Image (cartoon, rainbow, N blue to C red):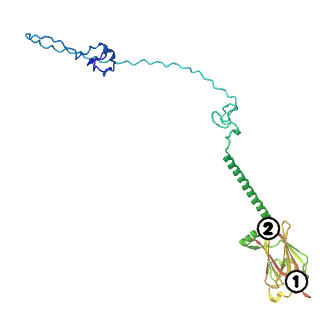
């Protein structure tokens, strides 16, 4: 064992560092006494037999090892100042970005700050597959537009050709849905009439009175105050609806009914009226009627001393 030169702790001879304070002890190896050689002969020292043995010497107390002193903290070293002079950024002479306004070099296609495209033609070139797909999409759009255009043309042509038929179908459905109501004229005129049987007797709604004329070919015309949908006309011939008085005068056999609309268009219906006191219904079904003319074409039972009697005309419009 040996003592540490720094703290005095006991350290084995083969160790180079102190186990207590960590000091390096390699420098003290040259000062240590050489170890005895066991192979060298030892000299014998004569020991006198007569002399009394000396008392053993008292052990000398070894000095206590010194405690290591506290190490003071080192003074902080100020960091080396670094130059902070501003570095000038390279000036770009290209056009500014439309998104952020940053200037860009002329050769750039995307913004140096926000990566926005700087020119419309900066898109990446498409592959052949993408171009073919886009071409197919464009061709499909063209075909769809052509089909839509053909359908529209067909609808327009169909509407022009079949408009009257379609309108009549719709009007007929409305006629059946809403029903009919009687409509009276506001004025009338006639080509001929008898003094006791004027044209107004045919539309007064009373029985056993009538419009009388002397010969066939006469007509009576009735005007209405507003256009209406004419559904039909109910015709009663003869001077009366009583059987014994019905054949006392001549009766119309064929009538021509002309309905005139507000636009001047006419609808003509020629009907053969049965020779019966029962009213006969004539379906006309025309819209926007403002005037109706009833023309006596042929008669039956006209003999000497008799005249033609048309008992009643009732006009019905859609409710």
Q: Secondary structure at mark 1?
A: strand
Quadrant of residue 210 within the rendered picture: bottom right
| Residue 166 visible in rendering | yes
Question: Which residue is pictured at 71% across the width and 39% down the height?
Answer: 121
**Quadrant assignment for the N terminus:** top left
Left or right: residue 48 versus residue 135 is: left
Left or right: residue 302 versus residue 52 is: right
Q: Nearer the viewer, residue 116 or 14?
A: 14
Label placed on residue 282: none
The relative height of residue 38 versus residue 90 in the rendered view (above or below) is: above
Circle 1 Cα neighbour tier, 10 Å, few/some/many (<14 / 14–19 / ≥20):
many
Which residue is most to the left? 50
Question: Which residue is pictured at 73% across the width and 53% down the height?
Answer: 142
Residue hosting label 1 = 299
Circle 2 Cα neighbour tier, 10 Å, few/some/many (<14 / 14–19 / ≥20):
few
**Residue 128 position within the rendered picture, expressed as x and y whole percent measured from the top left:** 68, 46
**Residue 144 position within the rendered picture, expressed as x and y whole percent measured from the top left:** 72, 56
Question: Which residue is pictured at 31% across the width and 13% down the height?
Answer: 30
Q: How many numbered badges does the structure rendering display?
A: 2
Q: Gap in Å between the C-alphas at discs 2 and 1?
A: 35 Å
Left or right: residue 170 versus residue 89 is: right
The relative height of residue 87 versus residue 129 in the rendered view (above or below) is: above
Residue hosting label 2 = 164
Question: Which residue is pictured at 80% across the width and 88% down the height?
Answer: 243
Whichever of callouts 2 and 1 sits on the residue coming sooner in the sequence is 2
Q: Nearer the viewer, mark 2 or mark 1?
A: 2
Left or right: residue 56 versus residue 101 is: left
**Quadrant assignment for the C terminus:** bottom right
Q: Nearer the viewer, residue 138 or 236?
A: 138
Q: Nearer the viewer, residue 110 or 222?
A: 110
């Amino acid at each position: 064992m040996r003592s540490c030169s720094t703290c005095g702790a006991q350290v084995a001879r083969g160790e180079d560092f102190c186990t207590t304070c960590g000091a390096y002890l390699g420098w003290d190896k040259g000062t240590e006494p050489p170890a005895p050689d066991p192979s060298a002969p030892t000299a014998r020292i004569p020991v006198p037999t007569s002399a009394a043995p000396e008392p053993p010497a008292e052990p000398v107390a070894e000095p206590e090892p010194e405690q290591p002193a506290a190490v003071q903290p080192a003074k902080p070293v100020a960091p080396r100042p670094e130059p902070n002079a501003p570095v000038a950024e390279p000036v770009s002479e290209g056009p500014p970005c439309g998104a952020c306004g940053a200037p860009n070099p002329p050769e750039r296609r995307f913004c140096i700050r926000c990566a926005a495209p700087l020119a419309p033609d900066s898109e990446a070139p498409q592959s052949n597959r993408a171009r073919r797909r886009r071409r197919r999409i464009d061709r499909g759009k063209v075909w769809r537009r052509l089909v839509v255009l053909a359908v529209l043309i067909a609808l327009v042509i169909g509407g022009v050709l079949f408009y009257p038929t379609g309108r009549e179908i719709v009007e007929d459905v409305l006629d059946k849905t809403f029903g009919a109501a009687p409509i009276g004229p506001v004025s009338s005129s006639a080509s001929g009439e008898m003094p006791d049987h004027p044209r107004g007797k045919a539309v007064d709604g009373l029985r056993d009175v009538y419009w009388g004329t002397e010969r066939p070919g006469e007509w009576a015309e009735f005007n209405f105050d507003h256009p209406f949908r004419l559904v039909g006309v109910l015709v009663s011939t003869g001077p009366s609806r009583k059987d014994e008085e019905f054949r006392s005068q001549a009766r119309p056999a064929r009538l021509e009914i002309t309905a005139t609309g507000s636009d001047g268009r006419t609808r003509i219906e020629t009907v053969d009226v049965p020779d019966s006191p029962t009213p006969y219904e004539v379906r006309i079904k025309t819209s926007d009627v403002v005037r109706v003319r009833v023309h006596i074409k042929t008669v039956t039972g006209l003999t000497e001393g008799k005249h033609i009697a048309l008992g009643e005309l009732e006009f019905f419009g859609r409710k």
